[in-house]
Image: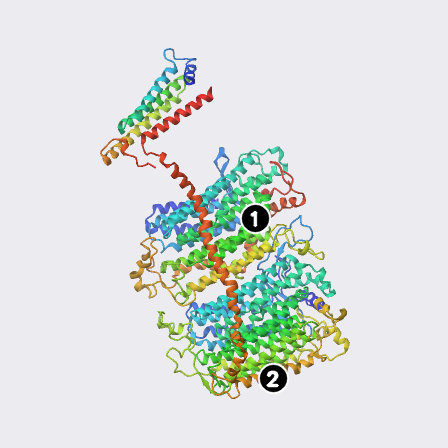
Amino acid sequence: MLNLIQDTIVHAEPQTLGAASQGAGHAHGQTDWSVAAIVALPLLACVLTGLCAALRVKSKLPAWLTVASLAGAFALTAKTFAAHFMGAESHAFVVHVFDWVTFSWAADVHAQGPQTNELVANFAFYLDSLSALWMLFVTGLATLIALYASEYMSHDQGPGYCRFFAAFSLFVFSMACLVMADNLLLLYLGWEGVGLCSYLLIGYFYKKPSAVAAAKKAFIINRIGDLFLAMGVMLIFVQFGTVEYSVLFEKAKPYIELARAGNFAQIPFVVKLIPCLLMGGAFGKSAQLPLYVWLPDAMEGPTPVSALIHAATMVTAGVFLIARTYPLFLLSEVALPAVAWVGALTALLSATIGMAQFDIKRIMAYSTVSQLGYMFCGLAVLSPSGGVFHVVTHAFFKALLFLCCGAVMHGFAGQLDLRKLSGVMKMPGWRVVGFGMLIGCLNLAGFPLTAGYFSKDMILAEAFVTPGTAVIGWILLLTAGLTAYYTFRVFFRVFVGPVAYEMGDEHHGADHGHDHEHGHGQGHGHAKDHGGGDGGHHQPHAPGWAINTVLATLAVLSLAATGLYFVGGDHGAVARLVDQSSAGFHSPLAHHESGAGQAPDHGAAAGAGRASGHAVVSYVPEFVRARAHQGEVHAGTFFGADPHKAMYFVSAGVGAVGIFVAFWLHLAGRKTAAASRADALLPALGPLPGWAQGKWYVDEFYDFLVRKPLWVLSHILYLIDSYLVDGLVDFVGAAPKAAGKVIRPSQSGELHGYALGMAGGAVILIVIVALVAT
Amino acid sequence: MLLMAAILIPLVSAVLIALAPEARAKTIALLGTLTQLVVACYAATVFDWSFSSRAQLGMSLAWFEGLGVNLSLGADGVSMVLILLTGLLGPVCVLASSTAITTRVRTYYAWLVVLQAAMAGVFAARDVILFYICFEFTLIPMFILISLWGSTNRRRAAIKFFLFTFTGSVVALAGLVYVTWFNATLDRASVPAVILSQHELLGTWTFDVSTLITAGQLMSAGEQAWVLLALMAGFAVKVPLFPVHTWLPLAHTEAPTAGSVILAGVLLKLGTYAIYRFALPMVPEAVATYAPHLSMLCVVGIIYGGLICWVQTDVKKLVAYSSVAHLGFCMLGMFALNNTGITGSILYMVNHGLSTGALFLLIGMIYERYHTRDMNQLGGLAAKMPVWATFMVFFTMASVGLPGLNGFVSEFLCLLGAFQASSSWGSGAWGSDIEPVAAATPGALGPWFAMIAGTGMIIAAMYLLYMVGKVVWGPLKTPHGHSAGHAEHSGHGASHGSGGHGTEDEHAHGLPTDLSGREIATLVPLAVLCVVLGVYPKPLMQAVQGSVDQTVAVVRTPLRSQGATPAPARHAPQPTNPAKTHGEGAQ
Amino acid sequence: MSLMAVLAQAGSPAPMAASTLAHYLLVSALLLVIGLIGFVTRRNLIIMFLCTELMFQAAGLAAVAFGRYHLNLTGQTLVIFILTVAAAEAAMALALVVLLFRRKESLNAEEWQDLKG
C-alpha cells in the first residue's frame, strides 16, 4: 500500500497539470480548467438560479439551468475520468485554481528543528481514482435527481423553485469541493458547505415547524462532528505542518513504516489521535452512532433532497473522508476497530428501528443509516474497496428507492404511511415506479446477482476473513436479514396486494386560519400537492415523464452497477480504482492467500498493484496481528469454508429468509391496506416493537441528557450574568452614590455655612503654611 | 496627510452639518463619510504593503511641545485595514439611519461623523496621548447617540456604557503614563547602543508610541505585570472580555441601529486593536506569562456568552451577547501569541465587524417595520420578506463561521493558533522521536483550549440557528396589527410602540414590506466583502503579516529567554536581549 | 505670631519711607476681614455682594503693595484685571440678584437653600 501511495504521489509530480503548489506565491502553471469547471458549473447554476429568484422567474428555467450545468459537470467529470483513470495505471494530479487560506510568516530563528512557517490551503483539486469515481456518481446522480426534481417541485414554481435549485446546485458545488479538495481545509469547506445546503433543503418547507427543527438539528449535530474534524485537521497541521494530502502522506511515511512493522508503541500518541478525531467528523456527517439522530428527521426535506443528499452523496462523505485519509487510519490500532464497531452497531440499531416504522421515507432513512454502517465496517475490516463499492451501488439503489417513495408521496398528496397505501403498482401509470421500487428493494435486500448483493458480500466476507472481526460479521449478517425484511415489508405493503389508498392531508387548510396570504396558495411551503386544499376528493396522479425517465434510468443503472463487479480487474472496476488511490490497500491476507494458491476470489487483493508491476505489500495492523496466531496471519474462515465463497450462499439465504418473512407477514392473506398478519404477532414481542417504533427513545435520551441540562444551565448563566456579574458592576457604580448619601447632609444649602467653611479652610491653610515656614 | 484627511474630513462635515439646514444633514453626512472612505481607499493604494510592519503615511506636528505630546499619525498594515473598515461602515451607517432617525437629525448625523473621525484617529495615532484622546473621545458621540436616539432603557444604557468603559480607560491611561515615566527616567547609559540608535527618544519625556513600546520591554517582569493589568483594565472592558462585558448587551440593545453597527463594527475593535498595539509589544513578558489566564477568560466568554445567547428572546440582545462569544475567539487567537493566532485575530476584527454589523442592520430593518425585537412576536418572516430573509441567513452563516465566508478563516486561524501554542508539544504524549512536531509554537494554551473554545462553534450554531429558526423560518408571525401591511399600520402603531419616543410610528411609513433599494445597498457591500474575504483572504492576511511577524518576534524573544534561564530577578531598567527588542526599530 | 513676624520682616528693606509694606498689608487684611465678617453675618444679598467686593479690593490692595515693593508692574496689572472682572461680575451678580428677588420677593439669602443635601 505504501508503495502505491508513493506511486500515486511521486508520479503526480510530472503529471500535475497546474503547478502543484507547495508553497505560497508560486508561479502557477497552466490550470486544467475543465477540472475547475466541474466545480464551477454547479456554482454558476447556483448564481443563475439566484438571479432567477431576483428576476421573479416563474417558469421551470431554474431547473433546466441546473440540469444543464450539472450535466455539463458530469460530462467533464467523465472526460477527466476517461482521460486519466480508465487504464490499469492511474496517477493523482493536482489542479491549482487559486490560493485560499495560504500565507507564510517569518520563520522563528530560535526554533529548534524544522519549523513550518506557512499554511497552505488552496482552492486546488486533487484528482485521483477515488475522487474521480466519487465525482462521477455525485454529478451523475445529481443531474438525474435535478431532472426528477424539475417535475417533483413544479407545484412550487417561483421563488421556492429557485431557492430549491440554488441550494441544490450549491450542494453539488460543495460536494465537489469536499471530494476533489487537495487539502483538508478545502475538504472542510465542502464538508460544512454540504451541511449548509442540507440545512437549507431540509428546511425547505420552512413554514412547517418540524422541518425547521429538523434542519436545525441536522446542522447542529453535524457541527459536533465538524468540531472533531476541525480538531483533527489542526492536529494534522501541527504534527505534519501541512494539510495538503500529497505532502501529508509523504510526511506520514515514517509512521506508516512503523505501523507496518507493528511497532505501534513507537507511534506517538498525538499521531494516533488523528484518526480518532477524523472519525468523529465522519460519524457526524455519515449519521453513525452516536450522532445518527439527525438523518431520519432530515426526511422533512423534499424527497429529491433526501435521495441525493441524505442517501446517495452527502452522507457518504464520512466514508470518503476515511477512505481519503486511510493511511492515517492505519496508524492507530484502535481507530479501525472503533470504526468497525460503531458501523456494525449502527447498522443493527437502525435496522431494528427501521423494522418498526410506518413512514416509508423514514424506513428508507433508517436503512440509509444502516447501510452507512455497512460501509464503515467495510472500511474498517480492511476492505476499503468493498466499502466504496457499497457506496456506489447504494447511491444508485437508495436514490432509486427514495425517488420511488417520492413519486408515491407526490401522487398521493404526501401520504407516506404504509398502512394507508396498498397495491400501488396495480394502479394505472404506476408501473415504472413499482418496478423501480422492486429493483431498489432487491438491491437493498441483497438479492442474489444484484449490485447490492455483491457489494454487501464483499464487506461481509472480509469481516469473516479478517481475524478478530467475526463478531462484526455475524452482526452484519443478522442485519442483512433484518434489512431484507423491512425492505420488502415496504414493498409488499405499498406496492402489491389489494388496491387501497387514502390520500395524504398535507396540512391543507390547517395553517391557513392565521395566515394572511391566502392569495398565494402556490407559494406555501407545506402545500406540496397542488391538487390539495379542499378535502380528500382528489385522485392520485401518476408521475409524469421526467420522474419516470429518471426512475427507469436509475433502475437500469442500479442493475448495471452489478457489472462493475465483473469488469476491470479481479474484483471489479471499483476495487481497482480504490486500490489506485490513497485508500489503496492490499488486504493483509493477500500474501497469505496468494501464497496458498487459493482461488483469486478474495477480498480486495490488488490486481492493479500487480498489474502495475509493484510487489504486493502486505500490511498487517497490530490489532489484526495480535489476534492472529503467533504473529502469522491466518485468514478467518466461515465454518471452515472460504468466507468469500460461503457468503455468496449464506447472505443470499439470509436475505431470502428476510424476504419470505416479509411476504408471510405482510402480503400473504392481506385484505386491506391497514392490517396484516404481522399485527397478530406483535403482542407476542412484548414492549419491543413499541420501543423500536419509538426509535429506542434515543432522541428523548439526548434531549434529557444534553439539551435540557444545557438549557437550564444557560438560563442559570443568564441569571448569573444579569444579577451577579452585572450586579457587581452596578454595585461598584452604586458604592460612590451610597457614600455620597452619607456625607450629603454636610451640604446645608446655606450660603453662610459655605462661606464660613471657606474662611475656616483658609485659616487652617494659613496656619499650616505659617507653621511650616517657621 | 492622508491620514490627517481621513480624520479631518468627518470633522469638517460635522461642522457643515451643524451649519446646514436640517434636510441637508443626511446628504452631507453621506458625502462626508464617503469621502472619508475614498480617502482611506486612496491611502491604502499609496500604502506600501510590502513593508506593512512600518508605520507609513506618517506626519508629525508639535502639539504640546513642553509635554512631549505630538500630533503624530501613521499606520501600519493592521491600522490601515482597520481604518478601511471604519471608512466602510461610515456610509453604511448613514444610509441605515435615513428612515430610522427623524428627530434632531442634524445633531444625530453630526455626532455620527464625529465618531467616525475619532475612530480613525485611534487607528492612526502614533502618539499615546493622541491615541488616548481619540480613544476616549469615541465615548462622547456614542453616549449621545445612545441616550438621545436609543430605545426604552437608553439613558441607563448610555450611562453604563460611558462610565464602565471610561473607568477602565483611565486605569489604562495610568499604565501608559507609567511607561512614559519609566522611559523618561530611563538611564540612557544602561541601554545598549543598538537600541538607542533606533530610538533616539529613549530616556526622554515623550509619548511616541514606538519609543514607549521599546521602553516598556525594558521594564522588569513585575512592572510589566502591573502595566499589563492596567492596560487590560481599560482595553478588556472595551473588547469586552468575559467578566467586564455587561455594558455591551445593554448598550447594543438600546442603541439605535447605526450605533449598534458602529459599536460592534469598530468600537469593540478599538479594544482589540489597543491590546495588539500596546499590550503585546509593550509588556511582552507579562503577556506571555499571563496569556493562559487571559485566554481562560476568553474561553469562558465564548461558552458563557454563547449559552446566554441561546436563551434570549430579544433578538438584538442575542446578537449582542454573540459579540461577547465572538470576541472571545478573537482574543484567544491574540493570546496564542503566534502568527496564525494573531493573524486570525486581526482578520476576526474585520470579519466580526462585517457580519455582526450586518446582523444589526438587518435587525434594525425589522425593528423599523414591526417595532419589536421580541422573537416571540416575530416569526416566519421569510414568507413576507424573502430578500431580507436571504440576507439574514447569509450573514448568520457568516457569523456561524461557515467556510467560504469570512468568519471561517479567522475563526479557524484563531483556534489553530491556540491549538499550536503549547510548549508541551514535542514532549511526552504530545511529541515524537521520529519526526519533530512541525508547527508547534511555544506557549501555554494548547489543544485543550482550542477544543473547549471549539465547542463555541457548536454553541454558535445553536443560538444563531435558534434565532434564524424563530425569526426567519416557521409560520408567519408578526406583532399584532402589522400582519396586514400598511393599511392598518397607523391604527395599531401606538399599541406596541416601544415607548421610547412617539415618532417611531411615522418611521415605518414609506418602507416597503420587503427591503427597499437603499437597504439592499447598505447590505450588499458587506455581503460582497464577506464572500471575498472568505474566498480570497490572502491579500488581507499578507497585508497584516509584516506587522504580525514583528509583534510575534517581540513577544517570543523574552518568552524564550524565560524558558532557557529561570527568570532572574530583574531590576528596572534592565535591557533585554538587545538584538530582539528593537521590534519597532524599522521605523 | 508668626504671621506678624513675616509682616515685620517684610518691612525691613523699605524703599517707602513713610509707610512700610506691612502697613498696606495690614489695611488689606483689615478690609478682607471686614468683608468676610460682613459676608458671614449679613443676610441681605446685596450687602453680601458688597462684602465680596470689599474682599476683592483687599486682594487688589495687597497686589499693588507688593508690586510697588518689588518695583515691578505685575501687581498693578493684576489690579487692572481685578477691577475689570469685578465690574463685569458686578453687572452679572446684580442682575442675578434682581432675578432672584423677582422669584421670591425677598433679598434674604436664606430663602435659597436648594442645594441642601
Label 1 Cα neighbours within 10 Å, binned few <14 / some 14-19 / many ≥20: some
Residue that carries the numbered disc 1 in the rendered image: B293
Alpha carbons under labels 2 and 1: distance apart: 64 Å
The amino acid sitting under disc 1 is His
Which residue appears at 35% of the width and 34% of the height? A747
Q: Are marks 2 and 1 on the same chain?
A: no
Q: From the viewer's perspective, tell me whether residue B503 is left or right of residue A210.
A: left
**In front of the other: A408 or B256:** A408
Which residue appears at 76% of the width and 78% of the height? A597
The image position of residue B571, as x and y in percent, is 61, 36
The chain that hosts pointer 2 is: A
Q: Is residue A302 visible?
A: yes
In the rendered view, tell whether residue B7 sits above or below residue A398. Answer: above
Q: Which mark is residue A656?
A: 2
The image position of residue B199, as x and y in percent, is 58, 38
Q: Quadrant of residue B278?
A: top right
Q: From the viewer's perspective, tell me whether residue B267 is left or right of residue A394.
A: left
Color style of the picture: rainbow
- Disc 2 on helix, strand or loop? helix
The image position of residue A736, as x and y in percent, is 42, 40
Residue most extreme to the top: C17
The amino acid sitting under disc 2 is Ala
The chain that hosts pointer 1 is: B
Q: Quadrant of residue B201?
A: top right
The image position of residue A499, as x and y in percent, is 47, 87
CB-based contact (under 8 Å), mark 2 and mark 1: no
**In front of the other: A666 or B110:** A666
